Image (cartoon, rainbow, N blue to C red):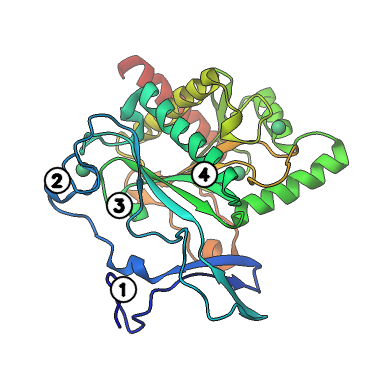
Amino acid sequence: MREPGVKGVNARRVIELRWDPTLSEWVMISNIRESRPWRPTSESACPFCPGSPEVGERSEAPFLLENRFPMLVPDPPRLDGVGEYPLVKAPGRGECYVIVESLEHDLPDLSFVGVDGVAKVIEEVANLTRRAMGEGYAYVLWFRNRGEEVGVSLTHPHSQVYVTPFTPSKVLRELTSAWRYFRLRGECLFCKVLKEELRSGERVVLEGGGFAAFVPFYAHWPFEVHIYPERHVQLLTQLSREEVRGLAEALVKVLKALDKVFDKPMPYVLATHQAPLRGEYPHYHLHIEIYGMLRASGKLKYAAGMEQGGGNFTYDSTPEDAAERLRQALRRVEEHG
Ligand code: ZN
Ligand code: ZN
Ligand code: FE
């Protein structure tokens, strides 16, 4: 029988992980996402606005909602077996949330929520991380997509959290590099990168409140900015209240500067990299990565042949130049708002 919300030739609900044995990483498969809404045209159809069945009569934001079209669920359908190597699968056990950042439907970006609001959003993610630890999950990834260029289907300001049964591939690669460096040099790779970036200053966008933002020496995306806590911590849950505020301030400034570079909304992807939830990772260092995707006004950087096919990025300017433009943009933000 066809299950509600499930489309396609395969009417069975499928929520599973499949192992790519060639790249050694998981792919998340969910067919309940095929029916998810695509850009509702009126505010009244917005599922994140007060008055919608999911939001009800709330008067305060941010708040957490369960994603109605999750990639992962706490009780995934039973598998008829996990398969045999090389074609192996696992249950898609996890949790997917939306953080509605504001009650205002038309707010253009997270930065418009203000420092207090952003601090509350970070606290939500930290609380969720604490809870996920207790439930034996592997990882909590907080991310935000901005702009229809990156496929945002609902414009009401929101970000997302995936609570996963595995550690994301990119974080695993960082952990491996950091572990090697730590064994070799006895110090944190990220602390060292930060120290070198601050020493040269060429690519630093801002520093203050216990955080530094810079365009990495090895930036992949045109306006890529990383925000590091100056204190060596691994998880959002380790940040003090003052540090959460410091991070919120840095984030608001960076996002506002990104919009000021071309005086138009910068499409971006933001992701938080924290340590896995199980085990100890003293060699890892919490940070936020933001990938600003316009390389010129109206010119979007695509991850295409070399990037998708080869896995290596091509950068059409220099990270030093991008940092200088971001510093100028930030000065304009501070002068004129
Ligand atoms: Zn809305
Ligand atoms: Zn460190
Ligand atoms: Fe990272």
Tell which tag, 2 or 1, sits nearer the viewer. 1
Mark 2 or mark 1, which has the lower sequence index? 1
Report if the CB atoms under discs 1 and 4 are less than 8 Å apart.
no
Query: In the image, which disc is placed on residue 6?
Result: 1
Query: In the image, which disc is placed on residue 148?
Result: 3
Q: The residue tagged with tag 2: helix, strand or loop?
A: helix
Q: In front: 300, or 228?
A: 228
Q: Ligand 1 closer than 8 Å to the CB at disc 2?
A: yes
Mark 1 or mark 4, which has the lower sequence index? 1
User: Residue 207: image x %, image y %?
Assistant: 56, 20
Which residue type carries mark 2? Glu
The answer to which image quadrant residue 209 occupies is top right
> What separation in Å lies between label 3 and label 1 (alpha carbons)?
25 Å
Which residue type carries mark 3? Glu
Q: The residue tagged with tag 3: helix, strand or loop?
A: helix
Query: In the image, which disc is placed on residue 317?
Result: 4
> What separation in Å lies between label 1 and label 4 (alpha carbons)?
45 Å
Q: Where on the image, by quarter, is ligand 2?
A: top right
Q: Is residue 116 left or right of residue 80?
A: left
Tell which tag, 1 or 4, sits nearer the viewer. 1
Mark 4 Cα-neighbour bin, 10 Å: few <14, some 14–19, many ≥20: few
> What separation in Å lies between label 2 and label 1 (alpha carbons)?
26 Å
Mark 1 Cα-neighbour bin, 10 Å: few <14, some 14–19, many ≥20: some
Tell which tag, 3 or 1, sits nearer the viewer. 1
Q: Which residue lies at the image location 33% right of the left edge and 53% below the top edge? A: 149
Mark 3 Cα-neighbour bin, 10 Å: few <14, some 14–19, many ≥20: few
